[in-house]
Amino acid sequence: MRPYELSLAEAAQEVRARRLSPVELVDSVLERIDRVEPHLHAYVEVTAERARHDARRAEGAVDGPLRGIPMALKDLIDVAGVATTASSRVRADHRAEADSAVAARLAAAGAALVGKTHTHEFAYGLITPQTGNAWDRGRVAGGSSGGSAVAVAAGAATFALGTDTGGSIRVPAALNGVVGLKPTYDLVPRRGVTSLSWSLDHVGPITRTVEDAGLVLAALVAPGRAQSFADYPRDGDLRGLRVGVPVNYYFDHVDPEVEAAVRAAVARLEELGARLIEVEIPMTRYIQATHWGLMVPEATAYHERTLRSVPELYADDVRVLLEAGALLSAGDYLRAQRARTLMRRAWLDVLDGVDAIAAPTVPLTAVEVGRDSVTWPDGAVETVSDAYVRLSAPANIAGVPSLTVPVGQDRAGLPIGMQLMGRPLGEAVLLRLGHAYERTGAAPRLAPVA
Amino acid sequence: MSSPELTPPEVARWATRAGLPLPHDRLATVADVANHVHSVVSVLRELDFGDTPPSAVYRAEEDFDAAV
């Protein structure tokens, strides 16, 4: 197996045993980037020299699982001295003065930055049009952390960070067959990360295995919290855990192949000892209204100055949303904030009866580039973006953690994801469930890009 | 619960009041999107919030003790 093919945990083991040096590992991933990047366009900027410098420094650093591991950061995340472009012309001359909190923590853990990855402009979209899906270049990468997910799926980074305001870690992770974790709100610091919507934004890892997601999360959180994300039970025995299976919302308007794969994965959790319990998802009529009522005015507020000074530099789809957001009233925003209070309480009540909820991450696999809408069998028409965000946004509103894991492929060979949602700060339960599921299947393989 | 849609001239006036004067060629497009956003968000008017406070600030730990 070539170094770029190794999972983070495998690579860490090789480095620790001195069978692989951080420099060799980084060089292997950089060579892989050279080979696949012309096809995928996952990166805004590849920081090869910096990566080699980080790797050389890691050779003599204190041991840890991230020492010398090649990582990519979504280009909303500040790294001192490097541009944070947000994949936007608005940021053409940007240069970050200081590390974001997460970049600083990962650097302290010894990770090597191989580059900054594409986002849908300022994270305001579910497609990431610059980047191709790792499994089929004619399909969308998903977004907004599309570059991060594609890089990890293709072996062009051993792990990556994304951000998630309505699904932007989990959607592209699911569409590219990798693992994505949106942590509990505020568990991972957002300082130095360009915001889309302050009250919904989360930063989290995108990896090839659940174990890797736990290792990265442990490096991102305050030291006192790290242990549980690295040390959860990994024997695959799920007895004693209760998994909620939604009877409403999460399987409505879902592609039959996606539903079948997720239900089969849920059955696998039961075989491993988990008890399945039907749960009713509360307040579903108000999910999109609450999400938009929070996100749209917050995004407009963040962009207030540049929307006035350089509106023509935004892409059309993002500009019009930002402009329309200026017309929402404070009353609308407060209603959304109050609805979130109600929704969060209702979700915590449901999670009082189960340890996690299992559901599809997205209702359909990666669509063809350029396709705007989906028509469901009952005649309902939905935009692709609305469909992709529909099942992931509740965890942003409620602030609960959500982990997506690959659970198969459709007939076209496109990946399908299952999300596991848990209680606030219950990431270890999700990692335990995801890891148990993962070890019953074949080892993850890279997308066949080149 | 329906409410009248904003017309492009109204969008011009509202946007100016909001501190974001829009050029004439933007008004129709922005009106379409603003009306759609409004139609989605206005569903929240159905809810009886009682004394419910906004969730602008909350701490993850305050409502729930995580179990592993």
Image (cartoon, coloured by chain):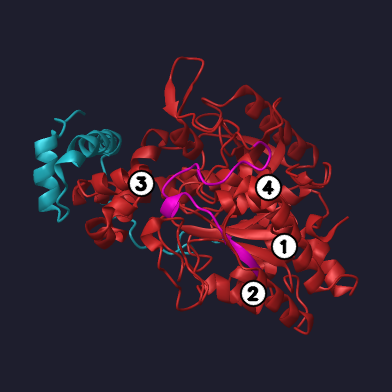
Chain colours: A red, B cyan
Crowd around label 2: few <14 · some 14–19 · many ≥20 (10 Å): some
Mark 4 is on which residue type? Answer: Val
Please give the range of residues in magenta.
Answer: A113-136
Q: Label 3, label 1: how many angstroms apart (C-alpha)?
A: 32 Å
Residue position for label 1: A30
Mark 3 is on which residue type? Answer: Val
- Chain under disc 4: A
- Chain under disc 2: A
Residue position for label 3: A318
Mark 2 is on which residue type? Answer: Arg
Q: Does residue A375 sit above or below B51 in this rendering?
A: above
- Residue A303 in magenta stretch: no
- How far from the left and from the top, in percent, is residue A314? 34, 51
Is label 4 or label 1 in front? 1
Q: Label 4, label 2: how many angstroms apart (C-alpha)?
A: 26 Å
Residue A178's disc is 4
- Chain under disc 3: A
**Secondary structure at numbered mark 4:** loop
- Chain under disc 1: A
Residue position for label 2: A50
Decide which of tag 1 and tag 2 comes sooner along the chain.
1
Marks 3/1 same chain: yes
Q: Is residue A86 visible?
A: yes
